[in-house]
Image (cartoon, rainbow, N blue to C red):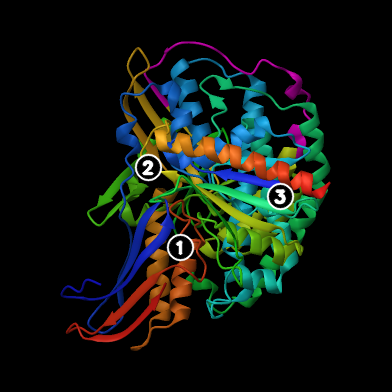
Amino acid sequence: MWLIIGYGNVLREDDGAGFHLASRLATDLSPRLVRVLAVHQLTPELALELAAKDVERVLFVDARRSQDKPVVMRPLDPPAAVGSCGHQFAPELLLQMTHSLYGHSAKGWLLTLTARQMSVGDTLSESTQSAIFTADILIKKLVTATVVQQK
Amino acid sequence: MAVDMQQKVIIEPITRIEGHAKITIELDDAGKVADARFHVTEFRGFEKFCIGRSFWEMPGITARVCGICPVSHLLASSKAGDAILGVRTPAPAVTLRRLMNYAQMVQSHALSFFLLSGPDLLLGMDTDPAERNMAGLIKLHPDVARAGIRLRAFGQALIRALGERSVHPSWSVPGGVRSTLNEQDKEKFLIQLPEMYTTLDTALDLMKDALDRYAGELDTYGNFPSLFVGLVNSDGGLEHYDGHLRIVDSKGRIVEDGLCAEGFLDLIHEGEETWSYLKFPYYAPLGPEKGMYRVGPLARLNVCDFAGTPRADRELRQFRHFGGRGKTVNNSFYYHYARLVEILHSLERIEEILADEILVDHHIRSRAGVNQNVGIGVSEAPRGTLFHHYQVDDNGILEKVNLMIATGQNNLAMNKTIKQLAGRFIRGDKLDEGLLNRVEHGIRVFDPCLSCSTHEAGRMPLHLQLRAADGTLVDEIKRG
């Protein structure tokens, strides 16, 4: 099963793109196919979600400023060792922590959406809205293809 | 590093905080520590930009002050709103707010103890920073790390069950709360409680081991007399949501009691310094030095007569041995221990509330308009007593906002703690990682709300220089 975690601050304009996309996906996709979480930020206890036995693939969705392409997806290489945690919690760290603590190694990817403005506000720029639309289709295809492949 | 006429040791930057901070340690001509300053160099301005907004918006806005303790601001702000409405908040709503506050105590204290201070406490201050971090903790104590994560997840899930989200919920409002807890959720949390109690037993054992391990240096982590401030209930018991304010001195004598928030604020002067945006509140009748006070878990356990729940009371009796007969525990290192006692107490209170029939009552919100132009909300945040003080016009538009946060109230004590540590560990002309780690930990014991970076065990970017009186660089150490 896929676990999708979209994160960001929805009161910081485009920064909330990951959260918004995850909220859409949670409505559209069946919970039998995928588990979707929309959160403000990555936190240590999310390791418990990653450690669930049926989670084989994890997709983190975040906003990224200075990204030319609307949507970029790349596989995540967990760091060799878990570092420190604080307010910021990287997806790689979460993957590695899950492996170290629970012996569970889900494959991870990071999908980033282009972000133009990250000031105070709850609206998204046109380019980010468009990126969310593109990523929405991409992720749905990805999830469906995985399910077909497994069958 | 800035070197004036005096010799200075500067630690900068301290990052990953709700702002930016640095530490300056000033040496005298003899090379001994003359002073220590904990600078907070970022201005956030909530008190200014909220003016002109409606007080109805304030719980949602001020919950954004912090990602770790949003519930504290949510509740203090709602209580200030209650006062402006001038109505009685329904008892079920008060109970639900208490429930969320206890859940927050659990998650925030669990983060502080297990994941952020855990590497210091369990691996040692002199351990290589490459090891003294979560990786090291997971390697040596994976069970502890897992248990800590489960405990924090329990608190976060309870907050989410009430407020839809665990970070920045906007569920509490002036006059009450938006929703109650459903029956299924109640059962879900009750079932998990035995595991959480077991986790606390383990944590308390680890804490006691750490006290033995650090016996030789414990007294340098902010061990000095001060006043202590916190809420107590009408019987003098441990309180986190309501009640009245009490001030005790370091001999355990009650200096002030039965204070309402307004009466307390009249006794406090918020000192300011040009070198920090963080204020320096003190108890005005005694002046800035003798009027220095501490808030938070240590203070709450010092001001209360009892906890009011069996497990926490048992632990509180042991905790009080460290202060001596009838006296307060004055060493800031015991903030860690106090956090565990408070988690235990919170779990017991959560258990009581989840079994309380009052949660069936769906009258959870009183509705009214502006009946008072001033409202003060006070509650106990994980880090200490929090005040929201609003003045509104007849339409509820804010004309004045004052937020007095726990970290600010501990500011004088944090500065003194750093000075005490530096005085003990800066010797000769060499600086080392041990000193850096201890200074970090001296801040971390307070778990300040600037603190995501001060929690950055072993990875906090630090730059510390030791210079002779003529400005020559004697030693230097960098990290990050």
Residue plotted at (42% across, 33% down): A124
Letter of the chain that mark 1 sits on in the rendering = B
Write down the residue under mark 2: A116
Q: Is residue B3 above or below residue A123?
A: below
Q: Earlier in the sequence, mark 3 or mark 2?
A: 3
Residue plotted at (46% across, 56% down): B451
**Circles 3, 2 touching at the beta carbon (< 8 Å):** no
Please identify the dominant SS of the magenta region. loop
| Residue type for callout 1 | Ile
Residue B283, given in percent of the width and then of the height, sits at 37, 46
Residue B77, given in percent of the width and then of the height, sits at 47, 30
Q: Is residue B304 left or right of residue B476?
A: right
Q: Is residue A54 left or right of residue B39?
A: right
| Residue type for callout 2 | Arg
Q: Is residue B305 visible?
A: no
- Nearer to me, A90 or B237: A90
Write down the residue under mark 1: B443
- Label 3 in the same subunit as label 1: no
Q: Which mark is residue A49?
A: 3
Letter of the chain that mark 3 sits on in the rendering = A
Q: Is residue B447 visible?
A: yes
Q: Which residues are magenta?
A: B351-375
Q: Secondary structure at mark 2?
A: loop
| Residue type for callout 3 | Glu
